[in-house]
Image (tube, grey):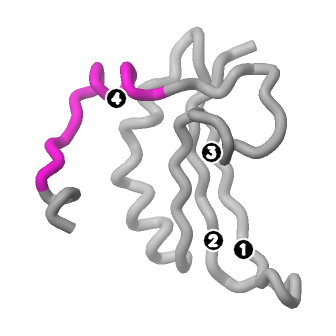
Amino acid sequence: MEWLENRNRPSSAELRRATLEKPTDFTGSTFPTDISTIRLTGDPQFIETIAGLFSWIVDMEDYSRRIEINLKETEDKETGEQTGNYALYLSVAERG
């Protein structure tokens, strides 16, 4: 927790420099790559509340990159039934 508490809020320029965009021809899982993606999981109230902290990512969209926002209800891995919780994915992708 101390590590997180000691982080300074980054500037817009720092955020842009630190973000690696998803190539336009990219397919497959993002786990083995260094593409910048934010994933949030939790109940609807948590997702709606915490998503406001990431409104800065929308400002990164411009003529060369677009913002991908995916929100989906999660499934129980064993039963395949909807859980009532959600996963929100935010990433920056090259325009193509």
Q: Position of residue 82 (x, y in %)?
A: 79, 82
Element on which disc 2 rests: strand
Q: Looking at the image, do the residues carrying marks 1 and 3 touch, with CB atoms under 8 Å apart?
A: no
As drawn, the label of residue 69 is 3
Q: Position of residue 83 (x, y in %)?
A: 71, 85
For the residues labelled 3 and 2, the Cα–Cα distance comes to 13 Å
The residue carrying mark 1 is: 74
Residue 39 placement, left or right of 5: right
Q: Does 37 lie within the magenta span?
A: no
Magenta residues, start to end: 6-19
N-term-proximal mark, 3 vs 4: 4
The residue carrying mark 2 is: 86
N-term-proximal mark, 3 vs 2: 3
Q: Position of residue 70 (x, y in %)?
A: 67, 50
Using the rendered view, name the quadrant where residue 14 is placed. Answer: top left
Q: Looking at the image, do the residues carrying marks 2 and 4 touch, with CB atoms under 8 Å apart?
A: no
Element on which disc 1 rests: strand
